[in-house]
Image (cartoon, rainbow, N blue to C red):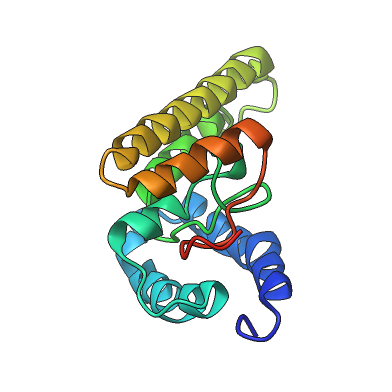
């Protein structure tokens, strides 16, 4: 489908499929190795068909995982890797809910969770995630072609999307 209807395939991928394994990553610890075949399929079949390219290198694959606010692919999300950051996402899901989980296990019907503390923890997780993305993109810019880096800067300034790595806008 990505060969004939790239926009529809991309939309189905980002609005549907990614969210399915997002739930799995957040709820099942240690699952990253089991998601490797899915990443292989995305990297070797889906992305080449979507981008009309035969080879997706490591740097290009990492670039495609960033959200559009950083000047790369995507609407809200890039084409995330199902196995990437799985353990971190699981921990980020566990931490805000741990006090509630403890109360459920203890059958504590009277205790309440501190919603403000949970909200602050969620904000911290979001800030940390965004900071890590910016740092990772800056590191990646050091090894990308100057032309690609220039396109990222242009997209960041104008809020445009870079549709593929072949230089086509």
Q: Quadrant of the N terminus?
A: bottom right
Instruction: Write the residue at 36% across / 33% down.
Output: 138
Considering depth in this image, is 54 or 169 the residue closer to the camera?
169
Q: Quadrant of the C terminus?
A: bottom right
Relative placement, left or right, of 54 versus 17 is left
- Does residue 104 appear in this view? no
Where, by quadrant of the figure, is residue 141 drawn? Answer: top left
Measuring from the top left, give residue 110's x and y in whole percent. 69, 20
Where, by quadrant of the figure, is residue 108 drawn? Answer: top right
Residue furthest out toward the left: 143
Instruction: Write the residue at 47% across / 65% down.
Output: 166
Relative placement, left or right, of 96 versus 136 is right
In the rendered view, tell whether residue 104 sits above or below residue 55: above
Where, by quadrant of the figure, is residue 14 drawn? Answer: bottom right
In the rendered view, tell whether residue 60 sits above or below residue 1: above
Instruction: Write the residue at 56% across / 38% down.
Output: 154
Relative placement, left or right, of 129 versus 18 is left
Considering depth in this image, is 130 or 27 the residue closer to the camera?
130
């Amino acid at each position: 489908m990505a060969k004939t209807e790239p926009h529809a395939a991309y939309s189905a991928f980002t609005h549907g499929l990614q969210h399915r394994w997002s739930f799995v990553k957040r709820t099942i610890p240690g699952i990253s190795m089991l998601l490797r075949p899915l990443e292989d399929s995305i990297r070797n079949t889906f992305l080449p068909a979507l981008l009309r390219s035969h080879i997706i290198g490591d740097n290009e694959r990492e670039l495609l995982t960033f959200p559009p606010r950083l000047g790369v692919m995507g609407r809200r999300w890039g084409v995330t890797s199902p196995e990437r950051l799985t353990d971190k996402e699981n921990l980020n899901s566990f931490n805000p809910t741990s006090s509630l989980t403890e109360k459920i296990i203890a059958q504590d019907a009277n205790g309440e969770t501190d919603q403000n503390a949970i909200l602050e923890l969620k904000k911290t997780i979001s800030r940390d995630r965004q900071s890590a993305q910016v740092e990772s993109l800056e590191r990646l810019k050091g090894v990308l072609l100057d032309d690609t880096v220039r396109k990222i800067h242009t997209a960041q300034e104008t809020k445009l999307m870079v549709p593929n790595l072949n230089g086509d806008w």
